Every structure is written in structure tokens, then in C-alpha cells.
Amino acid sequence: MSTLHVVSPFPRSNHSHARCQASALACAERTCAERGSRLTALRRRVLELVWRSHEPIKAYEILDRLHNKPRRAAPPTVYRALDFLRREGFVHKIESMNAYMGCGAPGHTGAAQFLICRLCGMAAEIADAGVSLRLGKRARELDFTVDAQTTEIHGLCAGCRPARRKRGQT
Amino acid sequence: MSTLHVVSPFPRSNHSHARCQASALACAERTCAERGSRLTALRRRVLELVWRSHEPIKAYEILDRLHNKPRRAAPPTVYRALDFLRREGFVHKIESMNAYMGCGAPGHTGAAQFLICRLCGMAAEIADAGVSLRLGKRARELDFTVDAQTTEIHGLCAGCRPARRKRGQT
DNA sequence: GAATGCAATGTTATAGTATAACATCAAGCA
DNA sequence: TGCTTGATGTTATACTATAACATTGCATTC
């Protein structure tokens, strides 16, 4: 059985987010350079905002944060940048939230699964081959050809769950 | 290994949809009677529309079909009915489409998975315990408590896929 | 039956998410 | 230079969903 592959964990208290974000941006720069696709200033800025934290961000929040100019950007600006970043595999959409989060492993092939905490709002990304293989197998049994899998799990992360108690305690 | 449990299949050509729909409505009636919850005329009508086919339906399409009165119903009418039907387990939301489909097995406990054909638009529901158990296990490893799972697979159903060819053929 | 309480529905307004369509700009190149 | 093409700007609008308050209608109690 394959082991648990955590692509993007719930950050620990000692997590240096600045480094985390910088490394995601660097990875995107590198990948685009290799591919000849253009990580423009706008797209880079949007990716930066997506990686501002481990909490999926809404398109209109990106919009609000994009400029503090008198005239703020219009929605297509953000949606187009997000489309690009998703095509390149740098950003995932969390369908059940209409929100976007950075991909912790661009280049990784195979489906991802997301765990989303209903309290702190943070999300983790895992890539469990067993889950996607099994779904693929089920699909095959129904003669169904898979294009894309979406798996999103909502619940409580370790940090947000009240401390466990021994049995018998109140 | 558990066997494939198809909750709501892609309908076959000999599928009697009238019977399929009627049985879903009867099941809802029965279940509500047991629970003491109220399947009002409006809610029943919405459930009927959700079951009009195996294609997930949009809220505003329900709205359009609800009355042909001069004054059509307002959105909250439909969303409230859908909320009720989802609470009771008669209807699922397909998050990746913002659409709703009837549940083929109200009362079934455990997570469902959906296969959605990008051509004909029809969706099938399966309940693979292996998938949800495995996801549950992964979550546990991360100390994450699961409330709800969403799994949606997009692709091509058997009927919409061009006939298979032998290797070597064009 | 009248008064009460409560769930369901009606109604109006608005918030939130996303795209169409066309204009403009900027960089590479014939 | 002028052309092509991809990126971005701009305006308008479509689509999805909920807040807030009014009204209705049924059940219960008196």
C-alpha cells in the first residue's frame, strides 16, 4: 500500500510561511521558463496572493488586494490570471468553496485530494494514489473514461479540534 | 474488497424513467412520513423536477420550470426547497457544477461519489466504501476529523465515448 | 371558534461568482 | 514600419445564492 503523500500540509507553528511562499513562486518561475509560458507581473502577483497563506482565497478577495489604486482591477483580470495559473498547474480551485489555493506540487501527475478545516479555514493537499486508482477502477467498471477528479474533505484540523480526553473523562 | 455499489446508474436505453422518478418520489413520501417531516406540494414538485432526468439540474432551471404563472417564483423558493431536500438526504449538490441531482439511495449512510459525463451531462452516483474508508484513514493520519466528503469525477460515459478500436487501427 | 405559535412560503433587495465582447497595449518579427 | 499575437483593460451582464422581513396557513390550546 502506498504511503501517505502530503503535498501541502497544514502548517505547523514553526512554519516559515515567507519561505514557503517564496519557494512556490520560484518553482513557478522555473517551470514557466522551462515551458516558455509567461509568468507576467500580474500573474505572479496573483500567485503571490494565492500563496499569502494556506487558506484558500476567493477571486474577489484577490481583486480587492490586487491594487490600492483609485480604480481597482475588474473581475476578468483576476479570473484570467487564475485560469492561466490553473492551466499551468500552480493553482487549484476548491469547488465546494469557490476558492483557490496554491498547488504544493506542480508537475505532480495524478489527482489530488483536499482537507479543509471548517474552523481555521486552512486547507491541506494530499495525493493518495490509492484513492485515485480506486476511483479510476470503479469508473472503468462502469465503462466511464475519467478526465478529472475532484475530492474535497471538510472537517476539523488537528489544531482546531478540542484536545482529546481519555475515555470516562467529561 | 467491497464490490461496486452503484446507487444511481447511467440509465440504459430500456430505462423506464417514469418508474424511476415515481419510485424516488414514493421513497421520499414514505421517509418523510416516518420522520414526521413535511414533504409539501412545493418541495415535492421540486424533487420531481430534480428527478426529471439523470442530468443534474441548476437551481434557476428549477425556478423557470416551477410555474408558468405570469409571476414566476423567486430564488429563495427554490433554494429553500433544495435545502430541505438536501437535509433529508433526497438531493445532492454537485459542487463542481452548481447543480443538483436526486439521491438514488436516501438513507444510505456513507459518502457517495459522482461520475459526470461532459457530453450528455448525465451523472451516476456510486457509494464505494473503499474510497471513503481510505480517505478517512488518510485524514486520521493527519489528525483531521471528517465531516463531509465530496468526490466528483468528470469524463465520458460509455454511451458518449466513440466505439473502441483495436490497437493499430486509426 | 378565537387566540396563539410556528413552520412554510412570498417578496424585495442585494451579495457574491463568473464570463462575453470588444478595446487597447506591448513585444517579437517579417 | 507595420503586422501578428498574446496579455490586459474596460464595460456590461449573466449566473448563483442569501438576507431580511411580510404573509399565509395549519395545529394546538383555550
Image (spheres, coloured by chain):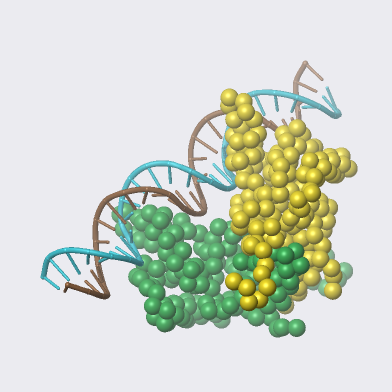
Chain colours: A yellow, B green, C cyan, D brown
Q: Quadrant of residue A125?
A: bottom right
**Above or below: residue B94 compared with residue A71:** below
Q: Which residue shows up at 82% across the image and 42% down it?
A: A19
Quarter of the image holding residue A119? bottom right
Q: Position of residue B39 (x, y in %)?
A: 38, 73
Q: Residue at x 79, y 70 (%)?
A: A130
Percent x, y of residue A112: 75, 60
Quarter of the rendering occupied by the C terminus of chain B = bottom right
Question: For residue B65, which quarter of the picture?
Answer: bottom left
Which is nearer the eye, B68 or B26? Answer: B26
Q: Is residue A54 left or right of residue B102?
A: right
Percent across and percent down for residue A70 are 58, 24
The residue lying at 38 percent from left, 54 percent from top is B74
Looking at the image, which residue is at 53% across and 73% down?
B103
Residue A61 appearing in the image: yes
* Residue A28 shows up from this direction: no
